[in-house]
Amino acid sequence: MQQQSQGRVYNFNAGPSTLPLPVLQKVQEEFVNFKGMGMSVIEMSHRSAPFESILENAKALLKELLAIPDDYETLFIQGGASLQFTMIPMNFLQPGKTASYALTGQWAERAYVEAQLLGDVNYASCARKGSYSRVPAPDQLNYRASDEYLHITSNNTIYGTQWKEFPQTGNVPLIADMSSDILSQPLDISQFGLIYAGAQKNLGPSGVTVVIIRKDLLQQANSNIPSMLSYRTYAEHNSLFNTPPTFAVYMLGEVLQWVKDQGGAHEMAKRNEQKTALIYDAIDQSEGFFQGRAEPNSRSQMNITFNIEYEQTQKTFLLEAEQAGFIGIAGHRLAGGVRVSTYNAVSYEACQAFSQFMIDFRRKYHR
């Protein structure tokens, strides 16, 4: 098996995913004795001044890197993005009102199904018949001006599609699950009423979910719900109502600092475009040997999905790729095929090596 420096494999897992090596090394150095305190972050009280400093630093870095306006709150919540599927309608879907969901993949479907348990929801679009190979243009969405919100999933990890332009929804709050592409490019936060993202793709380890919510929307949230499911609870207690995932928040801050040191969201976008071009070019120039699943104008910069014409050849590809040190490239069980996840921490060199592997494999097995 080929390995990178320090014996590390080429990690293309869809999530939890690869983290920046400098971050892992720094955390390793601080793990037993954080900043001379004689204990690890995981042993530290979440009520202590040092941890509150860690939390505030993470919030400040998010605000800086994403240019979050002052009229937004940043919250740290447990339960993953999947808990947000419930929290959103519980907080914002009032009795007798409706909300709309753009169904562009499995996670969007799950959000829709959870919302159905709590209120009246509609399809704004559904790409299921096209095997989720595309996302709709903003003007193709069918939602109501009276909707409490419109929900979208900005990047679809399973099918490899991504929104290139977000709808301008006016008075209808736009809510987005950005778990798999947040911080991969600059973003106009003011377009959204609420953004949520599980950390385990671009932000850090699993265990913490970032929620960015407009303050006026927060004030409109339902107050007659359990405390732990209320956004107001987290806002009023600075995400410290109960014990937060302290180590995940700490690592989130370290990853954010790494992104800042690399040049921020603009630099991430540039690198991601360069990285994914290597693999998409290998697909497009393969004379049909590799068959991309996503339509070209919906292709994701985070998750590249494709098939190989013959099933046995595809099995051989996955086996030889793993033997060559490329880990986590088997497609999701719902979609099959091949999936290469190229999040921020995945290096250009890793994508270059995988692209060359694809080229060499095609030369070897193309009939």
Image (cartoon, rainbow, N blue to C red):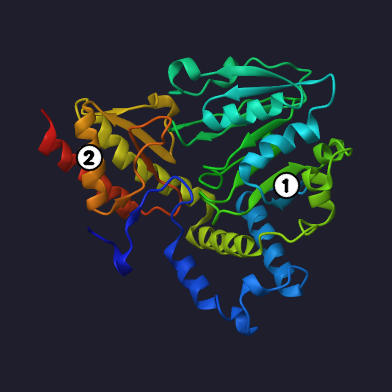
Residue 211 image point, x, y percent: 69, 46
Q: Is residue 357 left or right of residue 259?
A: left
Question: How far is the residue under mark 1 from the one under mark 2?
Answer: 46 Å
Quadrant of residue 363 within the rendered picture: top left
Residue depicted at x 43% and y 21%: 131
* Whether residue 41 can be seen here: yes
Badge 2: residue crowd in 10 Å (few <14, some 14–19, many ≥20): many
Q: Is residue 71 left or right of residue 160?
A: right
Residue with the mark numbered 1: 69
Residue 88 image point, x, y percent: 73, 35
The amino acid marked with disc number 1 is Pro
Q: Which residue is more in the foreground, 223 or 216?
A: 223
Residue depicted at x 79% and y 44%: 231
Between discs 1 and 2, the one toward the N terminus:
1
Residue 201 image point, x, y percent: 51, 49
Badge 1: residue crowd in 10 Å (few <14, some 14–19, many ≥20): few
**Secondary-structure class at tag 2:** helix
**In the image, which is nearer the foreground, mark 1 or mark 2?**
2
Q: Quadrant of the C terminus?
A: top left
* Whether residue 67 can be seen here: no
The image's mark for residue 317 is 2
**Secondary-structure class at tag 1:** loop
Q: Is residue 55 left or right of residue 349?
A: right
Residue depicted at x 60% and y 60%: 248
Q: Which residue is more in the foreground, 135 or 231?
A: 231
Q: Which residue is more in the foreground, 116 or 21?
A: 116
The image's mark for residue 313 is none
| In the rendered image, the vertical position of residue 254 relative to residue 366, given as above or below | below
Quadrant of residue 112 within the rendered picture: top right
